[in-house]
Image (cartoon, rainbow, N blue to C red):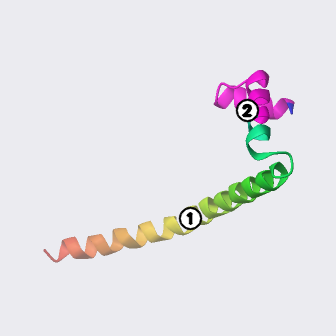
């Protein structure tokens, strides 16, 4: 919990009291039975987002070199 608090304090300016208030609001809005499912869905979506971002970075490099080659050939014909 200390590293999570440090993360939010450094990135978003949130401290422990703010996080507690947010958790209480979530508990009131969604109820105790739905919070684990909500947290699981949030974790899965973050995991998929990171995977998609990682996959997007790898093919972008070869595609950029191919587009530069095609631009060079099209500019040479003008």
- Position of 78 relative to 50 (above/below): below
Q: Earlier in the sequence, mark 2 or mark 1?
A: 2
Q: How many marks?
A: 2
In this rendered view, identify the residue nearer to me: 16 or 73.
Answer: 16
In this rendered view, identify the residue nearer to me: 67 or 1.
Answer: 1
The residue beneath circle 2 is 22
Disc 2 residue crowd, few under 14, some 14–19, many 20+, Cα 10 Å: few
Q: Position of residue 67 (x, y in %)?
A: 37, 71
The quadrant where residue 3 appears: top right
| Screen quadrant of the N terminus | top right
In this rendered view, identify the residue nearer to me: 11 or 75.
Answer: 11
The quadrant where residue 77 appears: bottom left
Q: Residue at x 42, y 68 (%)?
A: 65
The residue beneath circle 1 is 56
Q: Residue at x 56, y 61 (%)?
A: 57
Q: Position of residue 76 (x, y in %)?
A: 19, 73
Q: Is residue 65 left or right of residue 35?
A: left
Q: Position of residue 21 (x, y in %)?
A: 76, 27
Of marks 2 and 1, the one in the foreground: 2
In this rendered view, identify the residue nearer to me: 48 or 59.
Answer: 48
Q: Circle 2 sits in a helix, a strand or a loop, which is it?
A: helix
| Screen quadrant of the C terminus | bottom left
Q: Could you give the CA–CA distance between mark 2 and mark 1, rounded to whole angstroms?
A: 33 Å
Q: Position of residue 35 (x, y in %)?
A: 81, 49
The quadrant where residue 37 appears: bottom right
Q: Is residue 56 magenta?
A: no
Q: Circle 1 sits in a helix, a strand or a loop, which is it?
A: helix
Residue bounds of the magenta highlight: 2-24
Q: Is residue 20 magenta?
A: yes
């Amino acid at each position: 919990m200390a590293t999570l608090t440090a993360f939010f304090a450094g990135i978003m300016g949130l401290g422990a009291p703010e996080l507690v208030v947010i958790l209480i609001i979530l508990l009131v809005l969604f109820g105790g039975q739905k919070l684990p499912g909500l947290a699981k869905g949030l974790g899965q979506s973050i995991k998929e987002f990171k995977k998609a971002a990682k996959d997007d970075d790898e093919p972008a490099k070869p595609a950029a070199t191919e587009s530069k080659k095609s631009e060079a050939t099209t500019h040479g014909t003008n």
